């Protein structure tokens, strides 16, 4: 076993993660999550997580590695790492939420346009 200064007792480590997950779960809005994450993480850490989710969305939409690399400014190794996690439950849940949000946005626009047309009559 490798000894490092950051190695925690497993009970303490579990409790630390539990607290983090609970803080995020208790966030009432997107703004609350943003404020929490920006307070806990550096901009580089936050950007890395956001990019990993974006990579997953692009991969789910069958975008090429080259396109993802150019748009997000990430390495092919990072894309491959995300690709390996695409079938994990958490990634699938995240992608379902993104798809639901995209669906809702699309229908919101369609409904608004339909209402505008109706109001003009």
Image (spheres, helix red, strand yellow):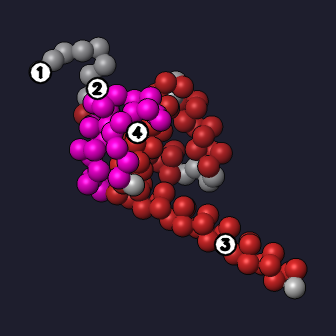
Q: Position of residue 49 (x, y in %)?
A: 44, 36
The question of residue 88 being in magenta is answered with yes
The crowd level at tag 2 (other Cα within 10 Å; few <14, some 14-19, many 20+) is few
- Magenta part of the chain: 62-90
Residue 120 quadrant: bottom right
Read off the residue under disc 2. 8
Indicate the quadrant containing the C terminus: top left, top right, bottom left or bottom right: bottom right
| Residue at 51% across, 28% down | 41
| Residue at 38% across, 48% down | 63
Question: Which label is found at residue 1?
Answer: 1
Answer yes or no: do the residues labelled 4 and 3 have beta carbons within 8 Å? Answer: no
Read off the residue under disc 3. 110
Front one among 57 and 90: 57
Read off the residue under disc 4. 67
* Separation of marks 4 and 1 at Cα, in angstroms: 40 Å
Left or right: where does residue 94 sit relative to residue 11? right
SS under mark 2: loop
For residue 93, above or below residue 30: below
Front one among 94 and 14: 94
Answer yes or no: do the residues labelled 3 and 2 have beta carbons within 8 Å? Answer: no
Front one among 71 and 93: 71
Left or right: where does residue 63 sit relative to residue 35? left
* Separation of marks 1 and 2 at Cα, in angstroms: 13 Å
Counting residues from the start of the chain, the first of labels 1 and 2 encountered is 1
């Amino acid at each position: 076993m490798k000894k490092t200064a950051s190695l925690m007792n497993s009970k303490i480590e579990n409790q630390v993660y539990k607290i983090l997950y609970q803080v995020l779960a208790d966030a009432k809005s997107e703004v609350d999550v943003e404020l929490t994450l920006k307070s806990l993480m550096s901009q580089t850490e936050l950007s890395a997580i956001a990019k990993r989710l974006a990579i997953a969305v692009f991969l789910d939409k069958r975008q090429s590695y080259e396109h993802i690399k150019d748009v997000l400014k990430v390495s092919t190794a990072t894309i491959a790492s995300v690709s390996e996690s695409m079938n994990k439950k958490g990634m699938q849940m995240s992608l379902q939420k993104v798809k639901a949000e995209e669906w809702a946005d699309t229908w919101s626009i369609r409904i608004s346009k339909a209402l505008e047309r109706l109001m003009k009559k």
